[in-house]
Every structure is written in structure tokens, then in C-alpha cells.
Amino acid sequence: MRRLIFISHRTGRPEIFAELRADGRLLQVTEHPGLAEWSLHPSHDGRYVYFTDASGAWRVELETLREECLVEFAGAEMREKGMVGAAMGTTTLSRDDAWWAIPVKVGGISRFVVVDTRTAQSRVILERDTIGHPQFHPDDPTLLRYAGPYDRRIWVINRDGTGNHLAYRRNDAAREWIVHETWLPGSRRILAVNWPHALVVIDPETNRIEELARFNAWHPMVNRSGTRVVTDTNFPDTGLWLFDLGGPKPRPAPLCASLATNQGAHWNTDHCPYDDGPMQVYAPQHTHPHPCFAPDDSVVLFTSDRTGHAQLYECPLDQSQAAP
């Protein structure tokens, strides 16, 4: 809670900044051409921020602002083309900060690279058509999930490359659109969205899906203890919603309005739009709220471009707001 890490374009290109929470001052952390703005991942111990650029995997030490290249990917494109899914180039750091997983695009192949942050040794654990939105399990640094093709989206794999399997086989006849998944801490289950119908929970061992709450949750995020969920909404945008996972059936309650523009007309659908054929997608991610909890659950952070520029906002929380 000492620093809030974020990306800003105020210098004319994406750079990592930190808000020093003690006094609200802003600190520019990087001076790095070609920084991939969606790749950053702060370490859980508060020491580093990890990020990629056009050809390598880096970290910056927050006390000294010293940048260090851990892995160089010669000849790699790093990311797929576009502005959504695997094209964002997101990465994941294990909760013990010992392992960093990075999807790397090389020609027509996506490679899943895992880096030992203590030795800078790396290995490819998987090669396939597409790999996006990876996430280490919050309680198990040997387990990851990632996104594959849109119609076979959620996959689980061990850190050593074994056990790669599809976590949920969607209902093709219903043209389900399963998206925006995240591990549920304290379990082996995955929170996801069956857009725009419901928030669901998937058991990757049994391939079963359970409806958690029926509403148009868009980008849900769970807190570190696995007890609360916050989500934005779209089509219609009714703001941010918060609910407690402790009861038998969660009852979402309104938290605040985001007033973000939520660009992405392809979300205005009752089924997976990619089933209708190839499409050109325009969905700048900085117009989406993507709410998340602060580590101590004191506030929910989100993005809004309500002023014409993307800004960070925070909404204070108290325990009563999560009551069932």
C-alpha cells in the first residue's frame, strides 16, 4: 500500500508511474522507449515492477529506479496484432514473486515462457496458436491459467508445461461467449463471464459451470482473500457493482458510476460475435473501467475517460458495502 503503480502517457509515450500514497506525489519510474503498457506487473513484495518491451522482459527496482533486462527475445514480435485479448500482451507474476510467465508471439506460433526471477533463467513450457491473459494461481505458484481461441477460451497448465487442458467446453449451440476469467483464491475454481447473461464459476477439474449471479457483469475482479467481487457493466452501463461471496447466493449491490465511454460495439450482443465470422474490433482498453481492489480492500480502483482522458479513480469501501 505504499505505492499505486500505473501507466501514464503524459510524457507522450507509455511509462510506468507511481503515486506515493503517503503524500500523493507522483514519481516517474521508467524512461523506456517501447514499453508494452499492458504487460506491467508489480511484485507482491513491493520491490520491483516487471514489464516487457518490443524485444525483451525487464524489471525496474522501485527504490533505485534501476532497470534490468532478464530475458532478450531476439526476432520475436512479442504480441499478436490488435487491441484486445492476446494482443494486449499481459503477463503474470506468481504470488511468491519467484516466477514470471510471458506469452511471446514468434511468427505464427505463441510461446509460453516462464522466467525464474531469481536466476533470470527461462524456458518455453508450451507452443500453440494463441496464448493470452495468463494468471498464476494466487495460492499455488506451480499452476497457471491462460486464454486460448475464443471458442475454447479457458485453459489450465502446470508451470513445468504438463497437464495442459481445456477448463470448460462451451455450449457451441448456444454460442456462449465465455470471457474475463480469474482464479478464485482459496479454491481451484475460476470466476468468469458468460456475456452478457451471467457471472459464472468454472471447475477446471470437472469441466462444470455454475451460475453465480445473473446480470451483465463485464470485467469482474475478486479480492485477495476471495471473499468479495467487484465488476463494471456495459450495454447497459449501470456502473460498478460489489458483492460478498460468503452467502449462499450473492446479491450484487451498486457501488458507484464510472462514466467511462466503454468503447467496443461488438459487446452489444447476446451471443459470441466471432461466431458470425471475422470482424474488425475497435475497443480501446483505456475506455474500460477494469475495476480492482486495493491489496488491503480499502478502496476499489478503476479507470474512466469521463473527462476526455483516461484517469484513475478510487472509491472507498467499508464492510457494510459487502453485506449480503
Image (cartoon, rainbow, N blue to C red):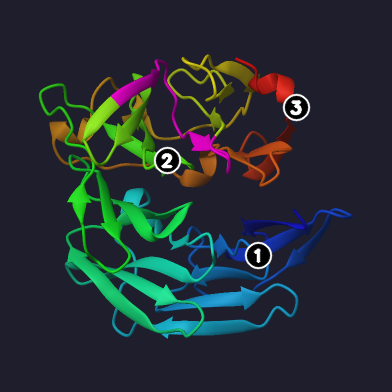
Q: Are marks 3 and 1 in contact (CB under 8 Å)?
A: no
Say above or below: 202 vs 46.
above
* Residue bearing the label numbered 3: 318
Query: Between disc 2 and disc 1, whose residue precedes?
Result: 1
Is residue 281 visible in the rendered structure shown here? yes
x, y percent for residue 120? 46, 84
- Say few, some or many: other residues with alpha carbon within 10 Å of mark 3 (under 14 / 14 to 19 / 20 or more): few
From the image, tell me which residue sits under label 2.
Answer: 187
Q: Is residue 108 left or right of residue 242?
A: left
**Would residue 153 appear left or right of 174 to someone viewing this image?**
right
Q: Tell me, yes or no, whether the highlighted magenta stretch contains residue 217.
A: yes
Pick whichever of labels 2 and 3 is earlier in the sequence. Answer: 2
**CA separation, marks 3 and 1?**
25 Å
Left or right: 74 as drawn, with respect to 99: left
Badge 1, how many Cα within 10 Å: few under 14, some, many 20+? few
- What's the amino acid at mark 2? Ser
> Helix, strand, or loop for circle 3?
loop
Q: Which mark is residue 22?
A: none
When the figure is inspected, residue 217 is found, relative to residue 96, above or below; the finding is: above
Q: Label 1, on which residue?
A: 45
Residue 112 is situated, as x and y percent measured from the top left of the image, at 29, 67
Q: CA distance from mark 2 to mark 3?
A: 25 Å
Q: Which residues are magenta?
A: 210-226
